[in-house]
Amino acid sequence: MTAISEEVTKKDSLWDKSGGWQGVATAVVILGLTRIVQLLMIAWMGAANSEPKTVWDRLLIWDTGWFIRVAMDGYPEGFTYAADGRMEGNELAFFPVYPMLIRFGAALGIDPGTAALTVAWLASIGAAIALHLLGTSLYGKRAGWALVAICCSAPVSVVLSMGYSESIYIALVAGMFVAAHRRVWWAAGLLGLLTALSRPTGAAAAIGLAVAALLAVRESREQAWKPLTAAAVALAGVPLYLGWVAYRVGDLTAWFQIQTAGWGTSFDYGKSTAEFLWTTLRSGDGWIPVSMAFMLLVALAAAGVALAQKPWLPLAVYGVVAMILVYGQAGFYHSKPRLLLPVLLTLLPAVVAASKARPKVAILSITAWALFGLWFGAYLVTVWPYTL
């Protein structure tokens, strides 16, 4: 059997295993239900807010403005300074894939805000399909649907409806791992590169792909150049963008300085995260900070359970490295649960449990999770005054 026919057979078997078009449609319907319910919650809760805004406006707040400015005005030439001479954050902090897609939509005559949400919503459909295929490939069809439901209704999954890059990042990283698991290396390499050019944690995804490539080479040395090339292409993504920023500004550490100046982001080996957890849980001041502290602890525990269950090694490595990057950096504590959403490793214990439970038990459990998660996300964009 030729290499091409082997790839076709693998893709066909995954397609059949996932339920074909009906299975994919079910995943998209699950996504659609979570988005509709949450948008209704946002409209309901926003109507009672002292500062009324339309649902549309609430989906275009915070980081969306940065992405749109990159898309429409391009990147600045260098550092940005306030009137007092203090360095500020600027658009160079934001990786290029999402802004490029917004720019493409705007070039078609679509309003930039509309283009931003259109790209995010289409990407969320791609994310649902990729998550379903990944869960199916690893654990079976029911796990695929459970992964979609649990991920898309998580407490910060509201960003999948907003002008944020999470939806496209999840679509790309899940698609990359599906391709790697099925040994379709050209697709894995391309998706890995795009993942790395979407967010800084794309570096963790590229490392996960490198592990998949090394496993493939160890198992069969035939055509080793394919997986190794895919890994090399993905690994080049983050250094490529950071190097371009350094060249544009004329400073090797430009991207890191901009991140620190604008968002207080720097790698401190988890010191600030530990201080936040200690202070918040000790004082109990504010239910949102307390709830986010518990989310960070629960995510750590879930990751430990997932690793004990010995998941597919590339996904485990990606999850561990991504969590080190999230927990190890200083920055806004209320953004950390959002940054953990694409990690996927923390969701695996619930996904595996749901796939093995009786259907009624699984549906009721996921529904309870979804009602809290969707309400929590709606609260964050209607009442909570700080950025995600």
Image: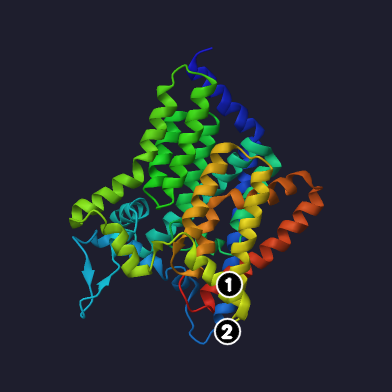
Q: Which residue is mark 2?
A: 48
**Quick one: label 1, few (<14), some, or many (20+) residues within 10 Å?**
few
Q: Is residue 337 above or below residue 303?
A: below
| Closest to the observer, 174 or 16 | 174
Give SS at disc 1: helix
Amino acid carrying label 2: it is: Ala
Residue 335 visible within the image: no
Q: Amino acid at mark 1?
A: Trp
Q: Is residue 41 above or below residue 161?
A: below
- Check disc 1 and report the residue beneath it: 278
Image quadrant where residue 75 sits: bottom left
> Which image quadrant: the N terminus?
top right
Mark seen at residue 228: none
Q: Nearer the viewer, residue 237 or 280?
A: 280
Percent across and percent down for residue 380 are 54, 73
Vertical order, 313 against 168 (above or below): above
Residue plotted at (67% across, 38% down): 139
Q: Seen in the image, is 193 located left or right of residue 48?
A: left
**Tags 1 and 2 in contact by the CB under 8 Å rule?**
no
Dot 1 or dot 2: first in sequence order is 2
For the residue labelled by badge 2, is the local secondary structure a helix, a strand or a loop?
loop
Residue at the (29%, 58%) spot, across then down: 255
Q: CA distance from mark 1 to mark 2?
A: 34 Å
> Which percent across, then down, holds residue 48?
57, 84
* Residue 325 screen position, x and y as percent: 46, 55
Residue at the (69%, 61%) spot, across then down: 369
Residue 9 located left or right of residue 261? right
| Mark toward the viewer: 1 or 2 | 1
Could one spot residue 194 in this view of the protein?
yes
The local crowd at label 2, few if under 14, some if 14 to 19, many if 20 or more residues have their Cα within 10 Å, is few
**Which residue is farthest bottom?**
50
